[in-house]
Image (cartoon, coloured by chain):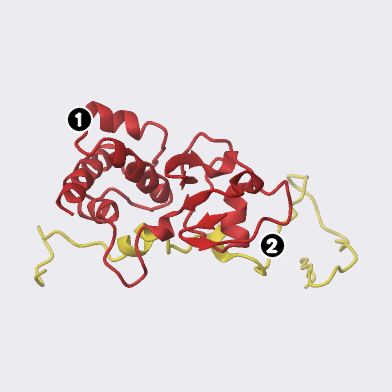
């Protein structure tokens, strides 16, 4: 499988969750595991460009597929991705635990809806839970991310 | 940013690493991190006479009130 553009070996254990494979085997701890049963959205990554819950997939299911995690949004020294920038500008995070999931969900959403309505934004992030900021700033961040992405 | 504090927006310094997936949460410590478990008394009010420790399994260590 390819993760953030890099070819990676298969998981040695067929029971390995994709989220655990990313975190423990590849050391990509930006992907967070909140509830481990597909409710909180913290572990959201892109699977062939589509947002998925990595805690509900086995690593072996990703064989031959292309994955993107939060670490792949921007190179370490490079400027942040427009979605990351928007969350920073709009205070769309506090503790940051849920943030990678929101970012990946937003990236996928804006590809499909580059100029979303407020209702579409609310719908798009309905699968991600945040216990710090409330959702007003996050909705604002997604709106801002759409603006920045259109400019980019 | 000015040196005035009241009424100024203060930029959060932690956001960038959190947004880049570079936050360090406890569960991110990774392989090789030591784990710790606390064994608590099932009795609300009791005297500890002789705490016993399980046989040592490398590299774990058990600490009791005696230690």
Between B63 and A64, the residue placed more toward the observer is A64
Q: Is residue A137 left or right of residue B7?
A: right
- Can you tell which chain is drawn yellow? B
Chain A colour as displayed: red
Pointer 1 and pointer 2 on the same chain = no
Residue B10 versus residue B2 in the image, above or below: above
Mark 1 or 2, closer to the camera: 1
Image position, residue A119 (x, y; %): 24, 26
Q: Quadrant of residue A82?
A: bottom left
Q: Residue at x 23, y 47 (%)?
A: A145
Q: Disc 1 to disc 2, how far (Cα)?
A: 48 Å
Q: Is residue A132 visible?
A: no
Q: Are marks 1 and 2 in contact (CB under 8 Å)?
A: no
Mark 1 residue element:
loop
Q: Is residue B7 left or right of residue A49?
A: left
Per the image, the residue denoted by label 2 is B36
């Amino acid at each position: 499988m390819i993760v953030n553009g890099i070819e990676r070996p298969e998981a040695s254990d067929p029971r390995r969750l994709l989220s655990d494979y990313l975190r423990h085997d590849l050391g990509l701890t930006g992907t967070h595991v909140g509830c481990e049963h597909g409710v909180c959205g913290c572990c959201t990554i892109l699977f062939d460009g589509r947002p998925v819950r990595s805690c509900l997939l086995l690593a072996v299911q990703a064989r031959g597929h292309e994955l993107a995690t939060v670490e792949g949004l921007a190179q370490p020294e490079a400027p942040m991705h427009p979605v990351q920038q928007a969350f920073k500008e709009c205070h769309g995070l506090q503790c940051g635990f849920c943030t990678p999931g929101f970012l990946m969900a937003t990236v996928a959403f804006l590809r499909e809806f580059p100029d979303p309505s407020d209702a579409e934004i609310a719908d798009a992030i309905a699968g991600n839970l945040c216990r710090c900021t409330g959702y007003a700033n996050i909705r604002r961040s997604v709106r801002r991310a759409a603006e920045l992405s259109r400019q980019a | 940013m000015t040196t005035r504090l009241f009424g100024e927006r203060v930029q959060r310094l932690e956001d960038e690493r959190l947004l880049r997936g570079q936050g360090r949460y406890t569960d991110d410590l990774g392989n090789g991190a030591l784990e710790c478990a606390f064994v608590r008394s099932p009795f609300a009010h009791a005297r500890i006479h002789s705490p016993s420790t399980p046989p040592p399994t490398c590299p774990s260590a058990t600490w009791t009130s005696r230690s």
